[in-house]
Image (spheres, rainbow, N blue to C red):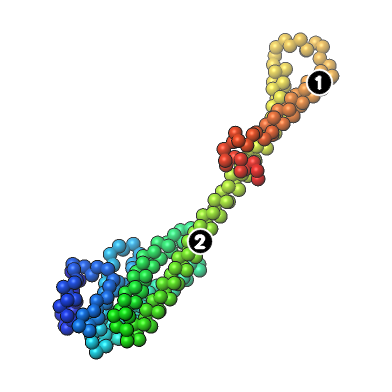
Amino acid sequence: MRFHLPPDWAVPARFTERLGDSAGRQRAMLADGHLLLILHEPPTPGVAERSARAFWRNPAGDWTSKGPGDGPHALKRHVAEFAERVEALEARWQSAGAAADYFELLRELAPLHRTTRNLHAVLQEARELVPGDRDLINLRDRVGDIERTIELLHGDARNGLDFTIAHQAERQAEQSFGMAMAAYRLNVLAAVFFPIVTLGAVFGMHLDNGLRDTATPAHFWGLLAVALLGGVLLARAIARKPTPAALPVVVRNLIRR
């Protein structure tokens, strides 16, 4: 839909000639003492299209708007909507705790930051085109403060997201390390008893091994000692740390810990 100025606005024809099928980017236009501001509403999350508002200042200094009300306070109300949006996002940042919360904040802050930055540039241009309007100077300064607040909030949300991701990765690394240590201890324990179980299984078979008729307690304790010695040697071999260069980086880091 083509963006039209109200038909009752007595604006120079140059303004209407510069308007296309859509409002386009935010901008300020001056002709014959008339100032026209094309500004965007605060962006709606998930909506790519931007709704525009027009603010007209005639040579006498009277403001008329196509947007939030009419009169000289319409532009102030437009700026106030950005301030209210930032306050709401700042309250959400205070209560954010999960990575999804920070991601949603960043998702809404990015288009709001772009719109506010362009709004600040347009008001600065309008202040230069009409240097004597104190309202434009004050609104430009207020939008500048809003822009800085958004930048700080964006940085805090980014830091919160990075910290949350790093903290979760650290917890997962600790859990993985604990599981690896549990498996390591189980392997060492199995290595100690593996020779005993093996010898017990071999000599427990119903085969003629030559020791059945000559078996004495000394034979039992001797085999048990040999099995325990073999288990200890096998456990030490398993517990020995391999050369770090032969291990992946993740395993090397776990061993150092």
Task: Tell me the residue at 16%/73% (across/down).
Answer: 17
Q: Residues within 10 Å of mark 1 (few under 14, many from 20)?
A: few
Mark 2 element type: helix
Three-letter code for the amino acid on which mark 2 is drawn: Asn
Relative horizontal placement of residue 250, taking residue 218 as reference (left or right): left
| Mark 2 lies on residue | 159
Relative horizontal placement of residue 138, taking residue 211 as reference (left or right): left
Specify whether residue 199 is in view.
yes
Mark 1 element type: helix
Q: Earlier in the sequence, mark 2 or mark 1?
A: 2
Q: Position of residue 172 (x, y in %)?
A: 56, 48
Task: Tell me the residue at 64%/41% (across/down).
Answer: 255
| Mark 1 lies on residue | 222
Q: Quadrant of the C terminus?
A: top right
Answer with the quarter of the image where residue 118 lies. Answer: bottom left
Specify whether residue 92 is in view.
no
Contact? badges 2 and 1 (CB < 8 Å): no
Q: Position of residue 167 (x, y in %)?
A: 56, 55
Q: Position of residue 132 (x, y in %)?
A: 32, 87
